Amino acid sequence: MAREFSTVGVVGLGTMGAGIVEVFARNGIDVVAVEISEPALERGRATLTASTDRAVAKGKLAAADRDALHERVHFAVGLPALHSVDLVIEAVPEHLDLKQRIFAELDRVCRPEAILATNTSSLSVTEISVATTRPNQVIGIHFFNPAPVMKLVEVVRTVVTSPEVVADVEALCARLGKVDVTINDRAGFIANALLFGYLNHAVAMVESHYAAREDIDAAMKLGCGLPMGPLALMDLIGLDTAYEILDTMYRRGGRDRRHAPVPLLKQMVTAGLLGRKSGRGFYTYERPGSPVVVPDEATPPATEAGLADGARAIAKVGIVGSGTMATGIIEVFATAGYEVVSVTRGAEKSATVCEAVKTSLNKGVVRGKLTEADRDAALGRISWSATLDHLADVDLVVEAVVEELSVKKALFASLDEICKPGVVLATTTSSLPVIDVAMATHRPADVVGLHFFNPAPVMPLVEVVRTIRTSPEATATARAVCAALGKTGVVCGDRSGFIVNALLFPYLNDAVKMLEASYSTADDIDHAMKLGCGYPMGPFELLDVVGLDVALAIQRELYLELREPGFAPAPLLEHLVTAGYLGRKTRRGFRDHSHR
Ligand SMILES: NC(=O)c1ccc[n+]([C@@H]2O[C@H](COP(=O)([O-])OP(=O)(O)OC[C@H]3O[C@@H](n4cnc5c(N)ncnc54)[C@H](O)[C@@H]3O)[C@@H](O)[C@H]2O)c1
């Protein structure tokens, strides 16, 4: 028989605590909600009220249920109010000494059979537990932000947590409608161990002016389907909390430099820029606690597509190549109204590409996305050629040939001879340095990267890569073209992986390392990222789709260029690739897909 929890206590009503109170009270459990002072208590109460009022306004909660929910919550200052609860969850700031002091006092105040739980993200539950005389009744219950919304709970058992306590807490999570993964006490557990290196890396990109905050966030949302970008997420987590988590993970997790908090973070915390809760972090908010972003001095000015920042007028576009990307990009430009010259290596290839574009456009017609007249007009705008000479009068060239530097360099040298002055020359490379390609011409200022995602007609993101020689006009032109294509162009520097791959693949690689270390299972890790962080796919699902060979190649390049020890490809990934387990395309990767 699982233990009955009729009253629980929550200590600390900040970002997490207030949400945790709501989770319990919504599920019919009485809560004693405790803070350090009257003003802090009032803030916590106001957060709970605002959250439940929002739920009522959105029709997710009946007004009567909200009132009943509030009646279940008893607010108090000081821990003695917790004398008769069955379980306490502590959610005070991420400092070991503070948590240890609180647990020592909870141990004195609470009934001997009460379970004492911490919501810590990164501290050792074991170290917290030894501050009490009942370490076997101490456990981690790690909720995700926002607690009422996110389905995942990580239940953290130490070597001394009693199995009954673990089972009781698991049953409690189920009662709360949460999905739990039970794991051992390791820095960052599953989700944060995989998340925070990525978040810190995104902050480093801001700090080094590699890309703008809006562009980094848009890249991860549109390129990976994440619910929010890393900087918006940092603001939601709270920069002070994020700093402490990183710092602890760095110290506890083997001094991985990727967890050493980026200096900018410390500066922002010291300056009181804590994120949403203080009204300003990476973004500026309407007021403290508000999710509404308002413009500030770093907000890019709204510009009219094609006219801003010296962007050049583009009417005719040359597209070189005959593969998947070239085919998709031809379709994208032609449907957006550009005159397109497709250049392939021969009439046969042109015919194949032409067929593929027709098929894709026809699908669009069947799905009601464009009319037959639109389709015919788009096809009418494309001319097919097997010689680069036909690019003499285009305004923009997009190169999408094989991913080999020598081939691309030779092509750009030819384009340099053939194209008129002022043309923007773009490469779609996903891994080669754009500057290498640019320097094959005598006009590196006009060369940019235009990194489309596959399938190009569907994916809304394009990374615009500017090299150290790219002119502002060429960058502005590329960005304006993306807007005219109905895509979001994000501008970044010329580094391996640009924004998306540089942030995505190390995270996937870390997931493989976690699996390899037998800390958790592929299923639980996938669950944790989907239910705890709202990712559309877990890392192993995604790796099987992307292809393990592709992931390994990208990860190797990141490692080679950045020399970051933490980027070294996971041996398990290398072995699976060697064994020919490449993912869905070979019917086996991390999972067996042969029966599907
Ligand atoms: N922010 C997140 O996204 C997130 C997610 C999961 C877990 N966590 C973890 O939850 C915990 C709380 O983080 P947070 O972001 O909610 O912090 P927060 O700073 O938003 O809130 C902490 C609250 O604790 C109160 N407090 C401080 N000392 C206290 C005391 N002695 N007695 C009672 N209350 C006290 C503060 O007044 C404040 O309201 C941390 O361990 C953190 O790692 C945070």
Image (spheres, grey):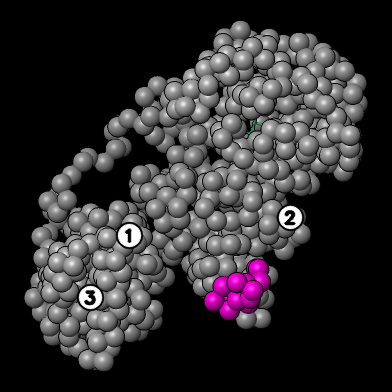
**Label 2 Cα neighbours within 10 Å, binned few <14 / some 14-19 / many ≥20:** some
Q: Which residue in the structure is indicated by mark 2?
A: 520
Residue denoted by label 3: 319
Q: Is residue 494 visible?
A: no
Q: Which residue shows up at 34% across the image and 57% down it?
A: 461
User: Which residue is at a point 68% across and 30% down the rendered structure image?
Assistant: 95
Say whether mark 3 is within 8 Å of ligand 1.
no
Look at the image and give the residue range highlighted in magenta.
581-596
Please tell me which residue is depicted at 30% across the width and 53% down the height of the picture. 488
Q: Quadrant of residue 378?
A: bottom left
What distance separates the C-alpha of mark 3 from that of mark 1?
16 Å
The dot on residue 462 is 1
Q: Quadrant of ligand 1?
A: top right
- Residue 153 is left or right of residue 506, and the answer is right
Could you say which is closer to the camera, residue 503 or residue 471?
Answer: 503
The image shows residue 152 at horizontal and vertical percentages of: 64, 42
The first of marks 1 and 2 along the sequence is 1
Helix, strand or loop under label 3: strand
Q: Is residue 93 above or below residue 382?
A: above
Gap between marks 1 and 2, in whole Å? 35 Å
The answer, for residue 342, to whether it is visible in the render is: yes
Residue 355 coordinates in the image, percent (x, y): 27, 81
SS class, disc 2:
loop
